Each structure stands twice: as C-alpha cells, then as structure tokens.
Image (tube, rainbow, N blue to C red):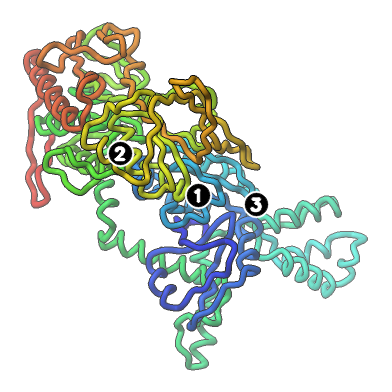
Amino acid sequence: MGNSLFLLPTFSTLFLLSLSTSLYLSTLSSTSLSLYPLLYLSLSLYLSSTSLSLSTSLREQQHHKTETGLPVIVDYYSNGCGPCRQIAPHFKKLAKQYKNKVVFAKVNVDTNRETSGKQQIRSMPTFQAYLLGKKRKQFSGADIQSLQSIASQLSKESQKYQVEITDEGLKNYYLGIKDCPHSASEAKAAEQASKILEKTGTGGPSHYKMVQRLKKKYGVAPPTKSRDNDDKKKSANKKDKKSSKKKTNGKSNKPNLHLASIDELMNEIEMRREKEEEEKEANSTGTDDDMDEAAVAPYVASGETERVVIIGAGPAGLAAAVYAARAGLKPVVIAPLEGGQLQGKGVLVENFPGVSGITGPVIVFDMRKQAAQFGTRFLEEKVVSVDVTSGTPFRVVTESQEILAHTVILATGADSRWLDVDGEYSYRGGGVSSCATCDGFLYRDKPVVVIGGGDTAMEDALVLARTSSLVTILHRRDTFRASHILAQRVLEHPNIKVRWNTSVVGFEGTNTTDGEPILSHVLARDQNTNKIEQIQVDAAFVAIGHDPNTKYMKGTDLDMDTGGYLLTQPDTSKTSVPGIFAAGDVADRVYRQAITSAGSGAMAALDAERWLSERGVTFDIELEVSASGANIKA
C-alpha cells in the first residue's frame, strides 16, 4: 500500500459501512480506498451485499501503525480551491517519487465532510503527516517545499521500522541463547518462533519492537532482513504459490473475492490500479490535466542572460508571456505555486470578454497552457530581490538561484490586506481566512462573517451563501463600495444580512487537543455607539482590499506612490528604471480587473520587445512546424 495515492470516499466513521459488489466493480478500476488515521478501511467486499463491521474497521486502522510502519501524508482539498488545483500534480509526483516509502492520501472535503469535520480542517489545502499513528505535522497552504521536506524526513525516520524477522532466523536465534527455556530443543525453538511471529504479523513496527524486547531480555538481537513494502510483488508471490493448486483442481484462476481476506482484497485493488496506471502511461491515455502539466516546460538554468524575465503568473504576467513568447523572446515566468487573485476566484467569471461559465482557476490554467505552447518556461519560486542598481543585465534572485535578464516585467499583483487586529494572525487557518472559495465549503451549514464592502467582499458573501447557514457582512461604512450589480445581489439574497457601521477589533477562540486554533467569536464595534459585541461564528473572511506586492523592490531606484504601487510613464508600462516594466495590479490602484491586467501585460511585452530591438539585443527565430503545432526555437 506504500506506493498509493488514495482518494477517500464519503462515509461516517461512527456507523457501519454497507457496500455492494456493484460499488466495488465501479470503483475498483479507478481508485483504492483507505482512511488514515481515523479509520483505515480495507474493504471486505463480497459477491452479494454485506456490511463491514466497525470492529473490523478499527482492526484495519492499525495497518500502517503496526505492520508497514510507513508514514502517511493526507491532503485535504476542494475542487474549487485554486491552490489545491495547483499543488495536486506535485502531490502526485511525490507519491511516485516515494513509492513504497510514504503513503499519500487525498480527502475531498466537498464530498467527505465527516472526515474533514472530525479532523477540524479549517483551511485548504491542509496537509497532515503521520508516523505510527501519531500526527507529526500539520500545515495549510500550497507549500511544495514543506511537503518535500516532511516526506523526506519521515521516510528516513521510518526506515528503522522496515524490518522482518523470519521463522528460520528466530528459531536459530533461540537455539543460540544459553539458559533459555526455548533452546532445549529445535522443536521448542520452532514452536516459540511460530508463536511470536503469529502475534507480530508480517513485519514492520511490530517486528522492530519485538527485536528491541528480545535484545533487552537476552542481551543480543535476533537477525532481521529488510521488509519489502511492495504489496504488488507480495500479492503476485501469493498468487504464484496458489496457482498450481487451483489449476490441478480444474478451477478458474480468477480471484475469489468472497473468499479473500481484507489484505488480499486491498492487494488486488492496488495491483489493478497500478496496472491501469501503467497501461495509461504506455498508451498515452492519461488525463488532459496530466498531459497539460507535462507540456509546461520548467526553467533550467543555462548561465545565459535571458531576454525577458516575467515576475508573476496572473493575467498580467501570463498575457505578457504569450506576447513575448510569440515574438521569439522565450520568456521565463517566475512565480510561486500559490497563484494570485484570479486563481482563487471560485465564482463564475462574468466580466472577461469571450469567457462564459468558467471560474478563475480555469482561466489561469488555460493562459498558462497557451504561454507554454509558444515556448515560455516556468520557475515556481518566489523572487527575493531584483538588483537594478547596475543597469542591464538585471540580476533576479530567487529562493534557489540567480538569473540574469536584459529586461524584467514586474507583474506580481496584490495580496489580500489584513485587519491587523488581536487574534487575526493566531486564527489564520483556524477560521480566519481571505479565500472564501478555498475554505468556504468547510463551514457548510455554519454561520460565517465577511468583513468588507467592495467587490471582493460581495463575491465572497455570494459564494458562502450557497453553503453556510448565515452570512453576515460587517462593513464600517453605511454604503457599499462594490459595483451596483454585485451589491444588489447581496442585498436581495435571503441568506445574507448586513451590519452597517461596524468594524472588527479582534478574534477569539479555543484550541483543539492537538493545539490547532479554532475561531469561535468575532469582536465587532458599533461605530455609532462604540459598543463592542461578541458575534459567534465558525469562520471570518477578510475582504478589505489588497496591497501591491512590491516589498521585494523596496530600496531600489523604482518610483512608487505612497501605497507601494509602481509608477509608470504615461501611456506605457515603462518604470523609472530603463528595461524594467510593470503590468497589472502592481501598478494599478484604480481599475484592478483581470481584463485590464491582461491588457497591461500585453503592453509590457510589446514595450520590452521594442526596448530590446532598440538596443540591438537580437533574437533570431526558428519556427519548427509539425502536425502538433508550431514550436519556436531561438
């Protein structure tokens, strides 16, 4: 089971689970089912409908804790969560990388409320890491570096548990122990060895603990061998041993599911799933997402000076990438995995020309594919600084490397603004959020508040009103700043109420037994009476505007206004430093729309291309045409 990426089904951990053969046949080819650590379910399915008893489920809960010793990393996600979508292919790659070393599981909170509720998941994506049934780490956010670090750390730590005591080795061990009651004869030694191995299972942590006990008791440890966690091989070996007997009896060699043990059923599921994955890869029948992800070329350091480096991967950055790539500039887009505002917008986008009935993450995904199609390369890291003091080439410093560039397009957008009040930071990820699309579903049938009065606040309220029992908007003024149509929808919605002239002064809550924060109250001040009231809620979504992401450019020669927005020359994207261009919300404090950002991104790419041409930076284009499209070489 150690090489699996599991998708967990919807069920209650408190009741019996009834599954029929039809369910088994419909899910077997696509997914293996498990839940860890709440309830590890190995599905004992029969040819007729039957129930899986709770006692059996609880027994199987101990599988990784006592038998495999493998770490388990669980991803709690939602289909409408932008960061969840972005980190999904990386999670899948890690599952392949740590095959037979770490178990990776996914829980869709949209359809599995029992599990996410029991674990008190308050933000998405949230990752939990377990070893021997104990939670070792939990964090929220699309942080691939933390995932890799945890997987590497726990994988190394679990290696000491990957041992197996053999029957022959344990028997000889007893025979070699002086003054041991089991060493009197070979029969007694064999009998004791069989008893111990019957109690301790097939290996893993139980064998490791037994080795430690015997070493403490007799002063020397029994011999062990490395345990193989490849269930596919184990299942195949078991089948080979049984195949000759089945053939002599004249019976079919197909698995008798109604006679199989739970472990045998899980092995069979895993074998079929892996076989299907291998066939998909061999026949190139993977999903569209898999192929699209593979088509996005990662940046590989070459030591050459890049013609265009684009910092940011929202509508502005990706539009600039499309234009620059089609001009043969082979741009490099540098942006972290988390994505921007449009990436996290779960409502249908209605104000982007030519786009209808799709959400923000889909638009960003399609723009990314289009840019990659023309030769854009991507580096999924944060930019630490840009050295503009010495002129071109500029030195762009990321988390892991330095890149030289003739021109740089700054398209880093803006981040959500926070209230900076007591308790806000403490309860982030525990009920305080800035992304209703990502985290809203976690508070289904629960009261929530939205803080703000602009378009973002209206959109968040409308998203939350679909699932929450009550949405209360807290706004410090007596009128909204939002567009008329959004404000009207909010005011007419039966599940949304507005509290005018109300400001938030703090957040209060408790902690889980694991120490995780849980929001319970918002402290709101009535600005007319100055009275502070505790509002009981399960979540609070802060939507009070955004601040431009220009901190990494502070202290440079770039001109900015008092709010940190980059200043550009009239009718261009040129900044105060020649060769540096700005696009999108990072330089727009007025419009701040996806469509205006995309337009300014195209302007920045055109300005950069012209700037390079005027300075004699050549970029000869070789266009290679094939049936699959055009591939630009330079």
**The disc labelled 3 sits on which kind of residue?**
Tyr
Which one is closest to the eye, mark 3 or mark 2? 2
**The disc labelled 1 sits on which kind of residue?**
Val
Whole-angstrom CA distance, mark 1 to mark 3, is 21 Å
Circle 2 residues within 10 Å: few <14, some 14–19, many ≥20: few
Q: Is residue 319 above or below residue 587?
A: below
Residue 237 visible in the current orientation: no
- Tell whether 454 sits left or right of 36: left
Residue at 53% across / 29% down in the picture? 533
Residue at 57% across / 70% down in the picture? 16
Whole-angstrom CA distance, mark 1 to mark 2, is 39 Å
Task: State the residue lying farthest toward the front.
Answer: 529
Residue at the spot of label 2: 491
Seen from the viewer's position, the closer of residues 210 and 332 is 332
Q: Secondary structure at mark 3?
A: helix
Tell me where residue 485 sits by quadrant: top left
Sequence-first tag of 1 and 3: 1
Residue at the spot of label 1: 74
Residue at 24% across / 19% down in the picture? 589
Q: Quadrant of the C terminus?
A: top left
**The disc labelled 2 sits on which kind of residue?**
Leu
Number of numbered discs on residues: 3
Seen from the viewer's position, the closer of residues 297 and 48 is 48
Q: Is residue 303 above or below residue 436?
A: above
- Tell whether 353 sits left or right of 57: left
Q: Secondary structure at mark 2?
A: helix
Give coordinates of residue 398: x percent, y percent. 36, 23
Give coordinates of residue 227: x percent, y percent. 61, 58
Disc number at residue 230? none
Q: Is residue 408 above or below residue 367?
A: above
Residue at the spot of label 3: 161
